[in-house]
Image: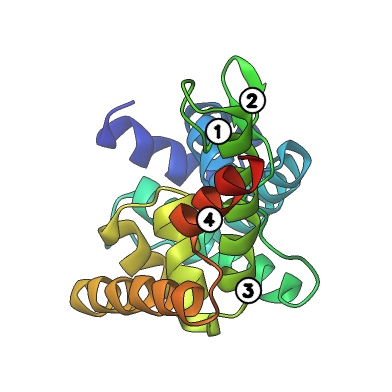
Amino acid sequence: MDTTEEKILVNRVKKGSIAAFEELIIEHEGKIYNIAYRFFNNEEDAKDLSQEIFIKVFNKIHRFRGDSSFSTWLYRIAINTCIDELRKRKGKESFSIDEDIKTDEGTMAREFQDKDLSPEEIVINKEIASQIQWALNHLSESYKEVVILRDFQGFEYKQISEILGCSLGTVKSRISRARTELKNLLINEKHFDYKNRLKTRKEGKQ
């Protein structure tokens, strides 16, 4: 759908056309669903939030002045809605790196081990995953959110900048500091001693 056609549909929606709005939904629902899904990794949440986003868009479309493209305006509403939902859930849910990854082909377990690792090493890798979770939960709120968005959810720096409402430089700096803090938590608390623990276990078998 080109910009001109989109503008025509938006004007029709402003005049009360439900059919025109349904065309806009069909055009953008996949993108909106993916945005919501990337935030929460849950199909039901993504569906519910997608519906909420389109209801907001329909109720606010008379405010759309055309300073940006409709899709950009829609994207911002989607991001803000997801951020609001994240804030509501703070303290109620924790991010789990053990949660299955959802793909177009279905779900798959997160893999932290190489296929050539021994059973002993696989066990230790699972422990490391748990330890990273522990450290992640001890990061400050501002550090935790950028690590999750960048390193676990895969958002680009520019996307994170838009989501959090801060400059690109701030995002890059915060991610760098967050990763350093995460590493320090693991090292200082002796939660990331993979080689020594593996060596100790192997020596114990001799």
Secondary-structure class at tag 1:
loop
Instruction: Provide the residue designation for mark 3.
Output: 137
Residue 78, disc: 4
Q: Position of residue 52 (x, y in %)?
A: 70, 53
Q: In this view, does 130 lie above or below 124?
A: below
Instruction: Provide the residue designation for mark 2.
Output: 108
Instruction: Report the Cα–Cα distance between label 1 and label 2.
Output: 9 Å
Instruction: Provide the residue designation for mark 1.
Output: 111
Q: Quadrant of the N terminus?
A: top left
Which residue is farthest top? Answer: 105
| Res 99 → quadrant | top right
Viewer-proximal residue, 162 or 201?
Answer: 201
Q: Position of residue 89 (x, y in %)?
A: 74, 70
Q: Which of marks 4 and 1 is nearer the N terminus?
A: 4
Which residue is farthest left? Answer: 169
| Res 206 → quadrant | top right
Instruction: Report the Cα–Cα distance between label 1 and label 3.
Output: 20 Å
Query: Which amino acid, mark 4?
Result: Ala
Instruction: Report the Cα–Cα distance between label 4 and label 1.
Output: 31 Å
Q: Can residue 196 be seen in this view?
A: yes
Say whether residue 175 is left or right of residue 126.
Answer: left
The answer to whether mark 1 and mark 2 are in CB contact below 8 A is yes
Query: Which amino acid, mark 1?
Result: Glu
The answer to whether mark 2 and mark 4 are in CB contact below 8 A is no
Secondary-structure class at tag 3:
helix
